[in-house]
Amino acid sequence: MTKRITLVYALALCLIFGIAYLVTRSISYDDFDSYNFGLAVTRFDLSLQQPQPPGFPLYILTAQGLNSLIQNPLSSLTTLSALTGMLAVVIIFFIGVTVFQSPTTAFLIALIFDAYSMADQREGAIRFGRSDDRVAGDLADMDGNFIGYQK
């Protein structure tokens, strides 16, 4: 029974945050790096700084695979972000199950943690649907001073 409950909670987290990420994803490129990643989805070329080094080859390769289905670099990148966000919350959930030995407690912790980190507070603005640097930054610094972001 506990394995079934654990699986139901994991699927619920995927569903809740998958829908939230996809509904709130960016509708445009929002910074210089985003443009370079978008260009790299159609042509990966480090000599043109698409994207800038180190180039995130696996990330771009995955986005290119999605782009072959979606046919839109921006949608491919934001869908990849949504998928990695869903994966991150499920990983947090399973870590919680291991630590707390309670799927319900782990579900609530993952739910709160990911809801908090979806509201990426950056330079006073709230931005949704971004998973890049989210988990590492939030785990290290829960008071809003995200690692890797310069204010």
Image (cartoon, rainbow, N blue to C red):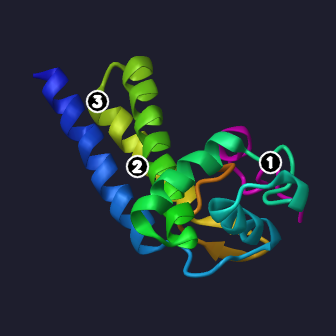
As rendered, which of 140 and 90 lies closer to the eye? 90
Is residue 143 a member of the stretch shown in magenta? Answer: yes
Q: Say above or below: 47 vs 74.
A: above
For image coordinates 56% across by 75% down, the residue present is 26
Distance Cα–Cα, label 2 vs label 3:
12 Å
Would residue 59 be seen by someone viewing this image from the given angle? yes
Label whose residue precedes the other's in the sequence (1 or 2): 2
Residue contact at pointers 1 and 3, CB within 8 angstroms: no
Residue contact at pointers 1 and 2, CB within 8 angstroms: no
Give the secondary structure at mark 1: loop
**Tag 3: residue type?**
Pro
Q: Residues within 10 Å of mark 3 (few under 14, many from 20)?
A: many
Q: Which residues are magenta?
A: 135-151
Distance Cα–Cα, label 1 vs label 2:
21 Å
Q: Magenta region's main secondary structure?
A: loop
**Tag 2: residue type?**
Leu
For this view, does 74 lie left or right of residue 55? left
Image quadrant in which you'd find residue 58:
top right
Q: Residue 134: image x %, image y %? A: 64, 50
Give the secondary structure at mark 2: helix
Q: Residue 19: image x %, image y %? A: 34, 64
As rendered, which of 27 and 41 lies closer to the eye? 41
Q: Which residue is mark 1?
A: 147
Residue 111 is labelled as 2
Q: Residue 137: image x %, image y %? A: 71, 46
Residue 103 is labelled as 3
